[in-house]
Image (cartoon, rainbow, N blue to C red):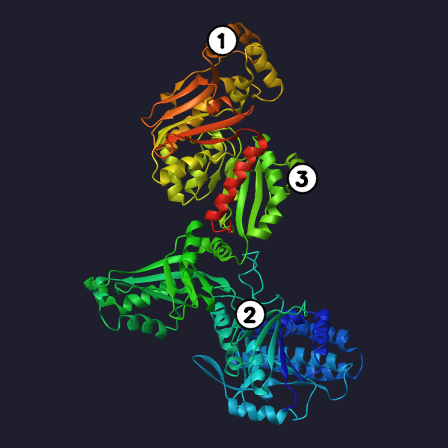
Amino acid sequence: MSQGPWTVHKFGGTSLADAARFRRVADIIRERSSTPQAVVVSAVAGVTDRLLELVTLARQRDPGYRARLQELRQLHEALADELLGDGARRETFRAGFDRTCQDIADVLHATSLLSTETDAIRDLVSGSGEIWSAQLLAGLLAGDAPAGSVDWVDARDVLVVEHSDLGPGVLWSESTTRMARRIPADFSGVLVFTGFIARDRKGVHTTLGRDGSDYSASIIAALLDASQVNIWTDVAGVMSADPRRVSEAAVIPELTYDEAMELAYFGARVLHPQTMAPAIARNIPIYIRDSGAPATAGTRIGSRAATDTAIKGITAIDGMALVNVEGAGMIGVPGTAWRVFGALRDAGISVVLISQGSSEHSICFAVPDQHADEVREIVGRAFRAELEAGQVHAVGITRNCAILAVVGDGMAGTPGVAAKVFSSLGRAGINVRAIAQGSSERNISAVISNDDAERALRAVHSGFYLSPQTLSIGLIGPGTVGSVLLEQLEGELESLAQSLNLDLRIRGIATSKKMLLAEQRVDLRGWRDEMATAPALDLAAFVDHIDADHLPHALIIDCTASATVASQYTQWLARGVHVITPNKKASSASMEHYRKLATQRREGNSRYLYETTVGAGLPVIHTVRDLRQTGDRIERIEGILSGTLAYLFNQYDGSVPFSTLVRNAREQGYTEPDPRDDLSGMDVARKVVILGREMGLELELEQLALESLVPAALVDVSVAEFLDGLSEYDQAFDARYRESDAAGKVLRYVGRLEADGSAFVGLVQVDRDHAFAHINLTDNIVQFETARYCANPLIVQGPGAGPAVTAGGVFADLLRLAGYLGAAV
């Protein structure tokens, strides 16, 4: 063996897909040539499958195998021309290549004549690709290297294996002897080894199976007593989740061997567990690195790894079936599990996951879905007598399942990890059908519906802050409040992502006529321009887009005042879509509808937040909830709940007719375009109903004593006619003002709730020293009289209207929702 420490590299087929990639591989090796390098290569991308296809065609007596072999010749000859030039290196390659191709042609001809194939034939033919790629790479590296410093090694000359039920096992003594014989003791250059192929103890050519080149690298590293193994791939390292399903997946810097094997077993793109065994036995670290970015660190796999999080990665296996064997006759009967799994072993069916309750009433296990019917039949035969006697009730099969696996050595002894896994799944509305965890506490596995796999991966991944907590958001009503909310969000998204690991992803905006959808996120700076060419609104399609299967949480923000939109909340909540809104229509509808909102929210495990329906951004509803939940008894809630009416009666002093004041307020934007929407008191009445229900009262809108300030004769006329006609009632308003002023009081339009359920909305007189008499022009003010706050009532006061404060209140509800869903808010 060499005096210096060997470094082993393995390059797969995608890293050798064309001449440019061969050169990139050569550059990687040259940059590391200060110590002896052993390079293990796979066949050029796709070549192994094409070689196996030749055998199949020949067995079928399809003469097309000759043309396919010629295509492979042309592929490798073109590579040789480009990589090796036209000198001796190319001629050396061509001589060996021609002999190998002729040998393959002879074998295929014999296969065609006999119409049969053997494992030996398939192994011989399919292993040729590695020989060709090893010769090409060695020839390329030799081009500018000192003579004798680069060579290629046919692994069949050094690796001796023996096949068993567990796969190919290395005959270490014989392989070590062969390696020592093949490699000069003082060699310090580069050796290019063929991956995938070996010999058995009889000298017959064989292969190491799929992922065999990785296994070859690990074996060669052990035989050379290497310092490390670099597995070069087309990814940056081992990812915390499949990046095709979780776009926020990140490279895991370090893994232990055990963590890597757990992730690999459950489908992660890591080494196959068996391929790591030789390196593990000799404590040789393995690095997973990106051949496209060789300067990056990738992932280190070793006996120890830094643990700064409880879990390292999350993965999932699709296409599983859950088998459940249950019956009272199984309780306390020794050997039941042995009978189940013994029968499956005899049939050659691998069980992926096992879960059994301590009662022994049932055994539950997962198998690949394609074996489900066979498993039912096998287990049914094994327990035929018990099934007929009723001791075993049934062999149940649940198809279309997936197994989610959460892996990390840091879980051991750490309380709350399982709770976090299952709470993340629960908040995402995902049902868990079976659970398994070994005593090592390194892995928590859950069987879920295959349809939920991507959502589950994202939910748990973000739940452990391996990626941002992602909310798929659709905003309906980008008008006065909605547009300001979008501006507020646009200004804070980057900060929230950095400080709270929160990804608020606006994926749709809908007006009353159009909808703008984006697969990733809407451009919040240019959405108005895009909306101009957006398709017509289809509300159902809009919500379907927002409630995407691949994202864990969906949210609709309704910034309209539409009863039609509000009527959809129950459906959205039932399907697990969260709702945030300043729209009062749903929460002040009939008690029957209000109860349905609560029921559907519970069934869908969703959240309904509507703080801004009363007092805009003021914490009015939260205050009611806090008082009740802490055991206080609310006796009365009274308040000025309309910014418009607060303004009008702050300004009205009898010097200007009331009708003129209303007209001026409308022109200054203090009222709705139709002032009757404010003067009717209905908006205040809805707020009173909402507060009453928060108090626990079963209050209907019709039960309120409501005083409208719109004269009956002006209810159904046009806005212009209303404004003109209102002057006829100025005298009545003036009389009420004079009466109040004479009594030393002021007029205020208030809403009032009593603990006994009585409720009033209308114009009242309040003392000049009352809190309601001293507010800013458009303030809302709410006074709470409770058992605790009796002599000195609790007051919440501030701007109760306006786009900025209302949008801010909606934004605050959004952050509350994110905190519930697991963000670090």
Tell me the quadrant of the picture where the N terminus can be found. Answer: bottom right
Q: Secondary structure at mark 3?
A: loop
Q: Position of residue 809 (x, y in %)?
A: 52, 36
Residue indicated by mark 3: 526
**Image: 176 above or below 792:** below
Q: Amino acid at mark 1?
A: Arg
* Closer to the camera in the image, 5 or 659: 659
**Image: 536 above or below 224:** above
Q: CA distance from mark 2 to mark 3?
A: 42 Å
Q: CA distance from mark 1 to mark 3?
A: 54 Å
Residue at the image position 58 percent from the left and 68 percent from the top: 253
Mark 1, mark 3: which one is toward the viewer? 1
Residue indicated by mark 1: 738
Q: Amino acid at mark 2?
A: Glu
Mark 2, mark 3: which one is toward the viewer? 2
Q: Earlier in the sequence, mark 1 or mark 3?
A: 3
- Residue 129 visible here: yes
Q: Position of residue 549 (x, y in %)?
A: 49, 49
Image-quadrant location for residue 509: top right
Q: Position of residue 601 (x, y in %)?
A: 40, 41
Residue that protrudes farthest toward the left in the picture: 389
Drawn side of residue 491 relative to residue 432, left or right: right
Image-quadrant location for residue 478: top right
The circle on residue 254 is: 2
Drawn side of residue 28 relative to residue 699, left or right: right
Q: Secondary structure at mark 2?
A: strand
Q: Position of residue 570 (x, y in %)?
A: 42, 36
Q: Earlier in the sequence, mark 2 or mark 1?
A: 2
Q: Earlier in the sequence, mark 2 or mark 3?
A: 2
